[in-house]
Amino acid sequence: MYSDETICLLIKRKEKNGMEYLFEKYYQSLVIWADTFIHDVNAAENLVQEFFIKLWEKSMLDHVQPMGLKNYLYVGVRNRALNSLEKTDPLRRVGEVAIPVSVAEEYDDFKDEVVEKVREAVERLPERSREVIKSVYLENLKYKEVAEKYGISIATVKTLLVNSLKTLRKEFAVYGEIFFLYFLKKVKKSFNRF
């Protein structure tokens, strides 16, 4: 295995094997790192591959010192993972989801009952998860504001939201994705009763 000093030297000289050695040394651990945020190995692999391509194409490592290389890579992957979560966070877009009229009509008869079940499911979440969800989706606070409010990191805020959403999706999987989004939209409108 090549040292970070050798890798940085080769990259600064624009030698392709520098990137190859970097990839061999860090790719697997960076994929695992990205997966801790986005919980999707395929997406994590794509994210890390795109990150390496960008590093090479934009010569982003030219000024990185060997002793800071590992940290630079991990921070870069973490930031990309968190940015991808923000872009794909379906709860952030619940109000924007266009629900077909047929879905609304089909579920109109028992929507109040299901909305109440979703609200109850949110209440059963662990305390911190529940606080974060309410802060983000009811008070419309930004992740940074929620992190400051509870004295936690932005990464923790996002992790709590992602894990909570997974829990809710599992519990309401019987209704299907489009119905789940429909009920979330309804719940968001009625959350002021919390």
Image: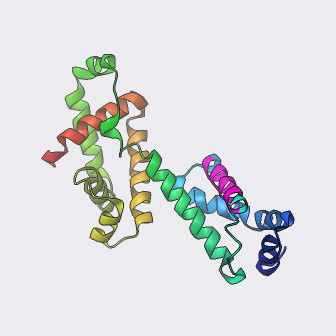
Instruction: Decide which of 64, 155 is in the foreground and name it.
Output: 64
In this view, the residue in front, 21 or 156, is 21
Q: Main secondary structure of the magenta part?
A: helix
Q: Dividing the picture into quarters, in which one does residue 31 lie?
A: bottom right
Image quarter for residue 7?
bottom right
Residue 194 falls left or right of residue 96: left
Quarter of the image with the N terminus is bottom right
- 171 left or right of 65 in image: left
Seen as rendered, the residue at the extreme bottom is: 67
Rendering quarter of residue 154? bottom left
182 in relation to 132, above or below: above
Q: How many numbered marks have been drawn onto this rendered protein structure?
A: 0
Q: Residue at x 35, y 60 (%)?
A: 143
37 vs 184, left or right, is right
Residue 188 position in % (x across, y down): 24, 42
Judge from the rendering whether residue 7 lies leftward or rightward of residue 63; answer left or right: right
* Residue found at the very far left of the displayed protein: 193
Measured as percent of width and height from the top left, residue 25 is found at 77, 68
Asked if residue 94 is positioned above or below residue 137 in the image, the reply reads above
Asked if the stretch drawn in magenta spans residue 46, the answer is yes
Q: Residue at position x 32%, y 73% from top? A: 151
Magenta stretch: includes residue 158: no
As rendered, which of 62 and 166 lies closer to the eye? Answer: 62
Q: In the image, which residues are magenta?
A: 43-55
Q: Position of residue 146 (x, y in %)?
A: 30, 64
